[in-house]
Amino acid sequence: MKFEFILNGITVTATVKDVRSMRLRVDRDGNAKLTIPRTFSESQILQFLREKEEWLERALNAMKKRRETECSMIKHRFESGETFVFLGRFYKLKIDENSSATQVEERGDELIVHGQSSLSKSQVQRLLNAWFSNKFNALVHALLAKWMNIMKEAPLSEIRCRRMKSQWGSMQPARRILCLNTNLAFCPESCIEMIIVHELCHLKEASHNARFHALMAYYLPDYKERGQALREFFRNGLNC
């Protein structure tokens, strides 16, 4: 059963479930969601929401900023001087239309798109997307080879990369299928490595229980710090 509460103009969608305590969260689309035990009264729910009012406003503002940051990383004009983010680094785009070859070159903090003649924005976009994709896929496969050897795991049956709304990655242990969020391409390599180790640990422990966290700590002792760095990378925005 679902219903709504209005808290200072904020709509909170509530769902009644067989749980022991209330849980309030903000999803990736900026929606406030409340889970309520079946035994709780309306007065208990309202009291809980009043106590969480300041937290909810902060959480909504943080999610809004994160969405704006992700949007600024994804949407581009593909013009010289524009900033691009890749593997935690910030690059300025430069378009060179007097080159003998059509290619993308990384030079310091610049990404230079070379072309033999005037390049359309769609051509620049295709060249950059191919360059980003090739580099990201090469890094993912290198990290997987490294950690599957360390963790003594058999090969995966499939590796998928796609845009994901609420997860950085997922693993289907029985089918040995790994899926990674393509937005990881914006993140520092150390954070991507943490996500890959996280998902590979699910081959040994499907849930996020104490054994899973013990495995993470064994293979990657600073995994919590890397997770915090990943959150802060998007929370802080494009300070370039």
Image: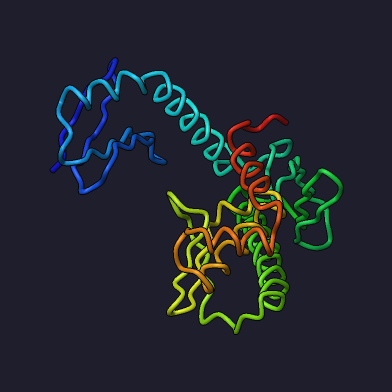
Image side of residue 45 versus residue 220, left or right: left
Residue at horizontal 77 percent and vertical 43 percent from the top: 94
Question: In front here: 73 or 45?
Answer: 45
* Quadrant occupied by the N terminus: top left
Relative to 185, say whether 49 is above or below: above
Q: Position of residue 89 (x, y in %)?
A: 74, 44
Question: In front here: 149 or 103?
Answer: 149
Q: Position of residue 188 (x, y in %)?
A: 70, 49
Q: Position of residue 4 (x, y in %)?
A: 18, 30
Image side of residue 175 versus residue 188, left or right: left
Relative to 43, say whether 90 is above or below: below
Residue at horizontal 73 percent and vertical 35 percent from the top: 81
**Looking at the image, which residue sits at the far bottom?**
154
Determine which quarter of the picture holds residue 3: top left
**Looking at the image, which residue sits at the far right?**
108
Image side of residue 83 versus residue 76, left or right: right
Residue at horizontal 46 percent and vertical 68 percent from the top: 206
Q: Position of residue 111 (x, y in %)?
A: 77, 48
Question: In front here: 162 or 82?
Answer: 162
Count the marks. 0
Give the color scheme: rainbow, by chain, secondary structure or one colour: rainbow
* Quadrant occupied by the C terminus: top right
